[in-house]
Image (cartoon, grey):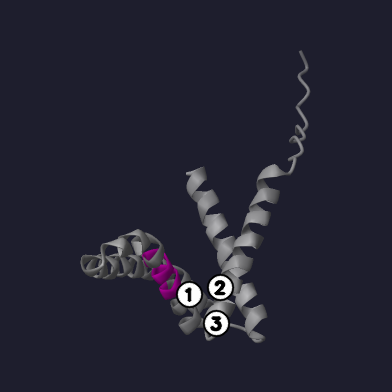
Amino acid sequence: MADLLGLAVWALLWLLALWGSLTLLKGRPVNPLLVLLATVSAPVLFVVGFVAGLFISAAMAAVFPPLLLLAVPSAFLLGVLLALAAISALTGVGILRSLLAVLLATLIASMASYLIWHTAVPPQIAGPTPLRPF
């Protein structure tokens, strides 16, 4: 249960960092619900773009087999571009700015999680114990 709580805290932290970085890069506030929708839909669209890129590369490799070497990198690039386009379309920023916002949010979330997990937690102070008469 603690692992799920930690994952939920990290996801909330990343979502807030993405919202802040998109707001910073756009120059005016971005709707947090659209950022949440973009965060949920971007991985799904990444997988859709990756699979579509693999199918397109496989079809092109049937004509020219050396193109099969570029199948995975081109499919990965298509998936990333589709995910960034979803973030860009939902939040109203450009694709390059959405890439910068994702990188900035990832940097902020990783630094915050490093600080959360690597700071020393002081020991708990024991509460007063009742005196026993005997």
Identify whether 113 is placed above or below 68. above
Amino acid type shown at disc 2: Leu
Q: Is residue 131 toward the left or the right of residue 30 in the image? A: right
- The stretch drawn in magenta includes residue 80: yes
Q: Residue at x 31, y 62 (%)?
A: 66
Q: Which contiguous range is marked in magenta? A: 75-82
Could you say whether the residue bearing mark 2 is in a helix, strand or loop?
A: helix
Residue 2 in sight: yes
Could you say whether the residue bearing mark 3 is in a helix, strand or loop?
A: loop
Horizontal and vertical percent position of residue 80: 44, 69
Residue placed under numbered mark 3 in the picture: 31
Could you say whether the residue bearing mark 1 is in a helix, strand or loop?
A: helix
Horizontal and vertical percent position of residue 55: 25, 67
In which quadrant is the C terminus drawn? top right
Amino acid type shown at disc 3: Asn
Identify whether 128 is placed above or below 24. above
User: Upstream in the sequence, badge 3 or badge 1?
Assistant: 3
Horizontal and vertical percent position of residue 53: 32, 69
Residue 16 in sight: no
Residue placed under numbered mark 2 in the picture: 99
Q: Residue at x 39, y 67 (%)?
A: 74
- Mark 3–mark 1 contact, CB under 8 Å? no
Identify whether 129 is placed above or below 107. above
Q: Is residue 34 toward the left or the right of residue 66 in the image? A: right
Q: Nearer the viewer, residue 100 or 53?
A: 53
Residue placed under numbered mark 1 in the picture: 84
- The stretch drawn in magenta includes residue 124: no
Q: CA distance from mark 1 to mark 2?
A: 6 Å
- Mark 1–mark 2 contact, CB under 8 Å? yes
Closest to the camera, between mark 2 and mark 3, is: 2
User: Upstream in the sequence, badge 2 or badge 3?
Assistant: 3
